[in-house]
Image (cartoon, helix red, strand yellow):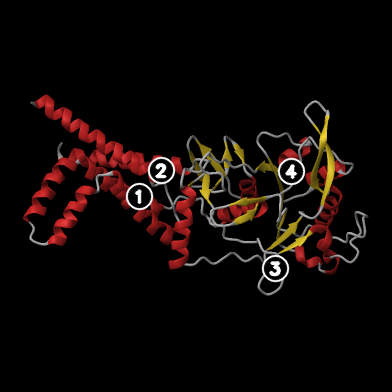
Amino acid sequence: MPRRSRIIISIFLSIGFLVFSYWVTNLRFPISGEKTILTKLELIHDYFCPRENESIDSVLFVNVAYDKELRPIVDEYGTPSGKTQITNRQKLLRLLQYLRKSNDYKFILLDVFFENDVQTEWDEELYATIESMKRIVIPRHSDAVLADNRLAQKAGLADYLVTFSESDFVKYPYYCDTAKSVPIKMYEEVSGRSVEKHGIFFTDGWHLVRSSIVLTFDLRANETYADNGDKIWNNLGMDLLDDTIPELNALGDSLLYKQPEMTRGKYIVIGSFHGDDTHTTYLEEMAGAVIIFNAFISLLNGHHIVSATLASVLFIVFFLLSYLTISRKRLKDLLKELAESSHKKSIRTLLRGLIWMCSWMGYSLLLTIMCIVTYITLGEAYDIFITATLFYLFNLSITLYDKIHKKIRI
């Protein structure tokens, strides 16, 4: 095959592998072994370039784990099915009415599910309050029905997928078909930007973006107290409200009464920070509300935008691998001659190593080295196993083609 033809084919193959790499990155479920790779990459990253965590000063975390109540549930036919534990709706209503009145917050992430199998005497007023509030978002599941249609405009998806080999939290999917997630809804309202879907591609303005990313967890809020003794998150009833006073508009001796400025200009994240809503990530156990808020922070920091530098590096690597694979037989013969004629052992070893690169282990090694470099320098990770396998299969097809072509010529 002429050199020009090999170059043209390699260019098209590199573009194809780039598109394939983008598609794999956007998969909503984790690939086998992805958590292990990310854990090791994060250790390497922290060794060479330790991360600086986002400041929590701009966030008020509200814990509802200790403000629960038992309520009867019914099935789809309205038949009683026992009882379940839910967030205390009266306390939640008291907090939201206070926030609606003050209206000095930046945005509210209310990580509490409102589904139609549970009803309380506070629901009507609670749903009306949520509907009337600005800058607030609640989660919903794609396979569940909201308790009230008025909540639909405030709801975003809070789902993620696992596989039989990977049940821990690894990737955050921003889209499910055309439905937007909680972080996307927050991002679009806060930033004024919009993430749009175009077939398998997603854009944010003129930027190509991913619809599913590995979170870097820029903000951590798992501990009750910070190093200086301040609380990282406050309990809804015990701290922010006065549990001894049940009236809706009475705050008594609560923190909100003593420090009304604590909500001013802040993101307010309401969720369960202990017990029933914690997930295993590739770093540590983390509350669901913290994971969702980190997904939002990742959007604000532009982690979803496809790096032009990474795309260029991948294109060059894919081009070299494609060209090396297509020219494998010719290069193998040339390298063997050079290796045999060389008097230096190091040069012979290097040349034989180049021949070995056209194997699955060779492709994997090169892609792993590149992945470590790009993760440290750009904070970007990409698939290694599937890409290396495809290159190896491509190499086998070229070898098979050469054998068939040789037999035909004979």
Dot 4 corresponds to which residue? 113
The percent position of residue 111, horizontal first and vertical second, equals: 71, 49
Q: Nearer the viewer, mark 1 or mark 4?
A: 4
In the rendered structure, are the residues bearing label 1 and label 2 in contact, judged by CB atoms less than 8 Å apart?
Answer: yes
The percent position of residue 108, horizontal first and vertical second, equals: 72, 53
Extreme-bottom residue of the structure: 228
Please tell me whether mark 4 sits on a helix, a strand or a loop: loop
Asked if one can make out residue 18 in the rendered structure from this viewpoint, the answer is no
Dot 2 corresponds to which residue? 21
The percent position of residue 89, horizontal first and vertical second, equals: 84, 47
Between the C-alphas of marks 3 and 2, the distance is 41 Å
Amino acid under disc 2: Ser
Up-down: is 197 above or below 377? above
Between the C-alphas of marks 4 and 3, the distance is 27 Å
- Position of the N terminus by quadrant: top left
Please tell me whether mark 2 sits on a helix, a strand or a loop: helix
Q: Residues within 10 Å of mark 4 (few under 14, many from 20)?
A: some
Dot 3 corresponds to which residue? 225
In the rendered structure, are the residues bearing label 1 and label 4 in contact, judged by CB atoms less than 8 Å apart?
Answer: no
Q: Is residue 251 left or right of residue 348?
A: right
Q: Nearer the viewer, mark 4 or mark 3?
A: 3
Please tell me whether mark 3 sits on a helix, a strand or a loop: loop
Mark 3 or mark 1: name the one nearer the start of the chain.
3
Q: Residue at x 82, y 66 (%)?
A: 255
The percent position of residue 121, horizontal first and vertical second, equals: 90, 42
Up-down: is 226 above or below 70? below
Which numbered tag is attached to residue 314?
A: 1
